Image (spheres, rainbow, N blue to C red):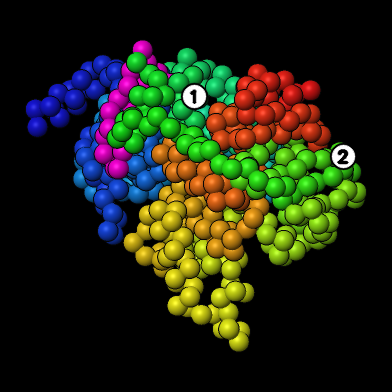
């Protein structure tokens, strides 16, 4: 009680407390899950604090409590020197907290200016004052390096610029603390560096930032300290002088993780796929390569190089104007995904939530989706066979779930990705295309996905793996195909490949 009175007296005297946010012993329970257990966290004024942890560690629950989306069960929150109960998102904004979620919260069909001031529009005589709204929005846009007109519709902006609209919106709220959840997941390296400069400018202006990311190299580059959560509890704090990827990983997973890329040697067999002179006007130019059984062929390149477009053509999602595709040295014509599946090709797409899963359906329904034809008899699904098939892959891939009937939307990112893999492995493909297979999942789940990929190669599956993370490409690939502006600029054997060689080919 005396401590509470002391805090109030200090605040009344106008003493500036060193911390903008103090979270003490927060607990939050959902049915059957203790999401947060006595979590405590401090953020200093003008500090960039990294918040890391595996999927399911409690990061999202904590920031949703700070955003006013969830209410805490027990514990206390001090913000700007005052004890607070955050009642709603609107109340969170009033206090000076702004959260930029990974799924951006923007209205696509209204302008940038209208998004920045949504719900707080500038008005005159009961009507929206567009000139004032646009003028004030423009000033904020300049602060974050957003080079477009305030009248531009958000739907016409690339993802990186939409991210900047969210930052400008946070500044319009006069936020004292901005929480950024995976803000670089869809950004290029250049766009990431621009965002980092904005974050540094915010820090210089006295604004505090909580930066959440699975990209540990970015955490090291931008933050002042790191707070680690594990299984809903505090795992530790790492100060700047001691900050390394190894220390973060050890605290995140509770053990030393030496092998993030556990690639086991695999016998590379006969050619199972050949692409010859594949061309799509203005997209792909004269693409030729081959894939062998048991081989992991990495595909590297910058954003816009044509990597995903190439895989969409091979899988029959998009047409091509010229070229040939051979499966097991036999020419084939793939006009649809159904043709591709019939030829033994599976495609794990980049966006698992929009393209890989039906979030409102169960694990069982998602994992059996591609194999349904084989599970039918007289037009009816054989539920016993379906359950048996899905349970087999849940066990093989170590998907953490209490029930096959659990909605896939409730799973962590790593487990969702395993469900996508289960869906395709259920049809026993000979060629598996993986587009950014570990994007947005934590380091422990990455190691598990890499183990699965390595095991599949050992079973003779030919794997094409697109990745924007060069350590992943180098660590997992037998050969690396590098693309630039729709062309293949080089193919590197595992022994000769380096980050420098890949980047040189990726920009040439």
Which residue appears at 50% of the width and 25% of the height? 218
Category of crowding for the residue at label 2, using alpha-carbon neighbours closer than 10 angstroms: few (below 14), some (14–19), many (at least 20):
some
Which residue appears at 34% of the width and 34% of the height? 252
Helix, strand or loop at label 2? It is strand
The C terminus - image quarter: top right
Query: How many discs mark residues in the rendered view?
Result: 2
For this rendering, which residue is in front, 191 or 215? Answer: 215
Q: Which residues are magenta?
A: 222-241
Category of crowding for the residue at label 1, using alpha-carbon neighbours closer than 10 angstroms: few (below 14), some (14–19), many (at least 20):
few
Is residue 169 in sight in this rendering? no
Relative vertical location of residue 270 with respect to residue 444 in this rendering, above or below: below
Which residue appears at 42% of the width and 24% of the height? 245
Is residue 373 in sight in this rendering? yes
Picture disc at residue 286: 2
Helix, strand or loop at label 1? It is helix
Picture disc at residue 217: 1
Q: Determine the image quadrant of residue 478.
A: top right
Q: Is residue 230 on the magenta stretch?
A: yes
Left or right relative to 1: residue 176: right
């Amino acid at each position: 009680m005396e401590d509470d009175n002391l805090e109030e007296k200090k605040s009344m005297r106008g003493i500036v407390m060193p911390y903008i946010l103090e979270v003490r012993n927060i607990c939050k329970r959902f049915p059957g899950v203790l999401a947060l257990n006595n979590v405590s966290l401090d953020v200093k004024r003008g500090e960039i604090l990294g918040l890391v942890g595996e999927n399911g560690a409690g990061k999202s629950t904590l920031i949703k409590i700070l955003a006013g989306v969830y209410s805490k069960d027990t514990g206390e929150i001090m913000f700007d020197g005052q004890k607070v109960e955050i009642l709603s998102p609107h109340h969170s904004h009033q206090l000076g907290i702004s959260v930029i979620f990974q799924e951006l919260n923007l209205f696509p069909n209204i302008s940038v200016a209208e998004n920045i001031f949504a719900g707080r529009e500038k008005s005159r005589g009961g009507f929206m004052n567009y000139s004032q709204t646009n003028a004030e929005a423009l000033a904020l846009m300049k602060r974050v390096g957003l080079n477009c007109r305030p009248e531009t519709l958000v739907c016409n902006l690339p993802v990186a610029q939409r991210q900047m609209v969210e930052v400008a919106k946070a500044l319009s709220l006069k936020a004292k603390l901005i929480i950024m959840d995976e803000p670089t997941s869809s950004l290029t390296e250049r766009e990431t560096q621009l965002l980092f400069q904005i974050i540094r400018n915010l820090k210089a202006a006295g604004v505090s930032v909580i930066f959440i990311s699975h990209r540990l190299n970015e955490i090291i580059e931008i933050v002042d300290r790191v707070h680690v959560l594990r299984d809903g509890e505090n795992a530790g704090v790492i100060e700047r002088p001691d900050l390394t990827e190894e220390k973060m990983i050890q605290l995140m997973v509770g053990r030393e993780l030496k092998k993030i890329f556990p690639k086991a040697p695999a016998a590379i067999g006969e050619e199972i796929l050949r692409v010859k002179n594949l061309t799509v006007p203005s997209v792909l130019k004269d693409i030729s390569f081959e894939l062998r059984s048991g081989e992991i062929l990495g595909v590297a390149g910058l954003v816009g190089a044509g990597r995903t477009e190439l895989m969409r053509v091979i899988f029959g999602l998009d047409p091509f104007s010229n070229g040939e595709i051979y499966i097991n040295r036999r020419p084939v014509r793939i006009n649809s995904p159904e043709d591709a599946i019939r030829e033994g090709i599976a495609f794990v797409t980049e966006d698992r939530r929009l393209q890989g899963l039906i979030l409102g359906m169960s694990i069982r329904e998602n994992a059996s989706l591609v194999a349904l034809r084989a599970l039918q008899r007289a037009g009816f699904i054989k539920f016993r066979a379906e359950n048996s098939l899905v349970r087999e892959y849940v066990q093989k891939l170590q998907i953490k779930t209490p029930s096959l009937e659990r909605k896939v939307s409730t799973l962590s990112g790593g487990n969702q990705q395993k469900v996508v893999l289960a869906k395709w492995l259920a049809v026993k493909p000979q060629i598996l295309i993986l587009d950014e297979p570990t994007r947005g999942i934590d380091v422990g789940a990455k190691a598990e996905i890499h183990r699965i990929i390595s095991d599949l190669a050992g079973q003779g599956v030919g794997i094409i793996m697109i990745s924007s993370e060069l350590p992943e490409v180098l660590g997992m690939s037998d050969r690396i195909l590098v693309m630039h502006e729709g062309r293949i600029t080089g193919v590197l054997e595992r022994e000769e490949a380096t980050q420098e060689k890949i980047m040189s080919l990726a920009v040439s």
